[in-house]
C-alpha cells in the first residue's frame, strides 16, 4: 500500500493540479492532499480560505479513482522543521510529489522520498494567471474544474479578490 502526499496553496484549485492528481493516482493507493498556507486568505496571492479550498478539492476529486485525505496545513516560520510539521498533521505517507523547488529540497533534506510530478501547460494552468484573469474581469472558468467555479461563485470569490486588490492598491501594497 503506497500513500502519497501532494501539497499546494490551490489558490484556486485548477486543471493543472487536477491532472497531476489524476495521473499520479495510477501509481498510488491513497493520496494525502495538503492545503498549504491554510492560515492565509483574503489577500491577492491567497484570496480563498482553507475551508473554501477544501470544498473545491473535495468535490473535484470525487470523480477520480483514488482515496484522498485532505489536510489543511498552516505555514510556520522555520522551513527547517516544516516537514515534521506536515508529518505531525497528516496520515503517514511514503512519498511526496511536488514541483515546488523549496518543497522538494525540504523533503530531500529530511530523507523523505520525493518525486517530481508531471507538468500540464503551465502557461495556462497557473494560479497567478487565473487570479489575474479574475481581477481583469476576463474568462477564467475554463481553466479550473467545475467544482472550483461553483465553490468560488458560492462565496462571491471574484468580487472578494477584486476588493482585496482595490484595498491593497489604496494602501499602496502589491502582495
Ligand atoms: P501551488 O498551488 O502553486 O502548486 C501546487 C503544486 O502544483 C506544485 O507542486 C506546483 O508545481 C504544481 N503545479 C502548479 N501548476 C501546475 C501545472 N500547470 N501542471 C502541473 N503541476 C502544477 O502551491 P505551492 O505554493 O507550490 O504550495 C506549497 C505550499 O507549501 C505553500 O502553501 C507553502 O507556503 C507551503 N510551504 C510552507 C513552508 C513553511 O511553512 N515553512 C515551507 C515550504 C512550503
Image (cartoon, helix red, strand yellow):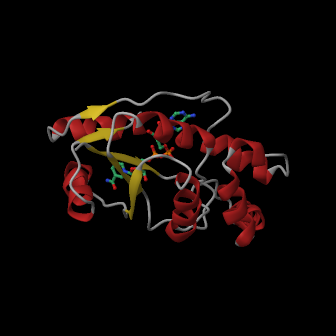
Position above or below: 108 against 35: above
The residue drawn where x is 14% and y is 37% is 111
Q: Where residue 150 sits: x, y (%)?
A: 72, 62
Q: Where residue 69 sits: x, y (%)?
A: 37, 59
Q: Quadrant of ligand 1?
A: top left
Pick whichever, 173 or 2, lies toward us: 2
Q: What is the quadrant of the C terminus in the image? A: bottom right
Which picture quadrant has residue 123? Answer: top right
Which picture quadrant has residue 170? Answer: bottom right
Position above or below: 150 against 138: below
The residue drawn where x is 58% and y is 60% is 59
Pick whichever, 40 or 65, lies toward us: 65
Q: Where residue 107 sits: x, y (%)?
A: 24, 40
Which picture quadrant has residue 56? Answer: bottom right
Pick whichever, 50 or 76, lies toward us: 50
Classify residue 75 as left or right of residue 120.
Answer: left
Pick whichever, 146 or 104, lies toward us: 146
The residue at the far left in this view is 111
The residue drawn where x is 51% and y is 47% is 64
Q: Where residue 12 sits: x, y (%)?
A: 61, 53
Q: What is the quadrant of the N terminus in the image? A: top left
Classify residue 59 as left or right of residue 84.
Answer: right
Classify residue 164 as left or right of residue 34.
Answer: right
Q: How many marks?
A: 0
Position above or below: 55 against 113: below
Amino acid at each position: 500500500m503506497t500513500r502519497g502526499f501532494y501539497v499546494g496553496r490551490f489558490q484556486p484549485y485548477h486543471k493543472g493540479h487536477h491532472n497531476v492528481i489524476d495521473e499520479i493516482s495510477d501509481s498510488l493507493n491513497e493520496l494525502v492532499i495538503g492545503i498549504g498556507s491554510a492560515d492565509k486568505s483574503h489577500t491577492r496571492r491567497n484570496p480563498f480560505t482553507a475551508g473554501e479550498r477544501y470544498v473545491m478539492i473535495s468535490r473535484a476529486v470525487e470523480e477520480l479513482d483514488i482515496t484522498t485525505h485532505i489536510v489543511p496545513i498552516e505555514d510556520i516560520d522555520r522551513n527547517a522543521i516544516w516537514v515534521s510539521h506536515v508529518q505531525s498533521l497528516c496520515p503517514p505517507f511514503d512519498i511526496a510529489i511536488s514541483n515546488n523547488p523549496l518543497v522538494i529540497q525540504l523533503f530531500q533534506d529530511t530523507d523523505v522520498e520525493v518525486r517530481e510530478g508531471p507538468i500540464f501547460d503551465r502557461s495556462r494552468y497557473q494560479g497567478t494567471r487565473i487570479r489575474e484573469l479574475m481581477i481583469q474581469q476576463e474568462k477564467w472558468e475554463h481553466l479550473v474544474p467545475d467544482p472550483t467555479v461553483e465553490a468560488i461563485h458560492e462565496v462571491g470569490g471574484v468580487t472578494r479578490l477584486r476588493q482585496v486588490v482595490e484595498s491593497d492598491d489604496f494602501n499602496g501594497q502589491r502582495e
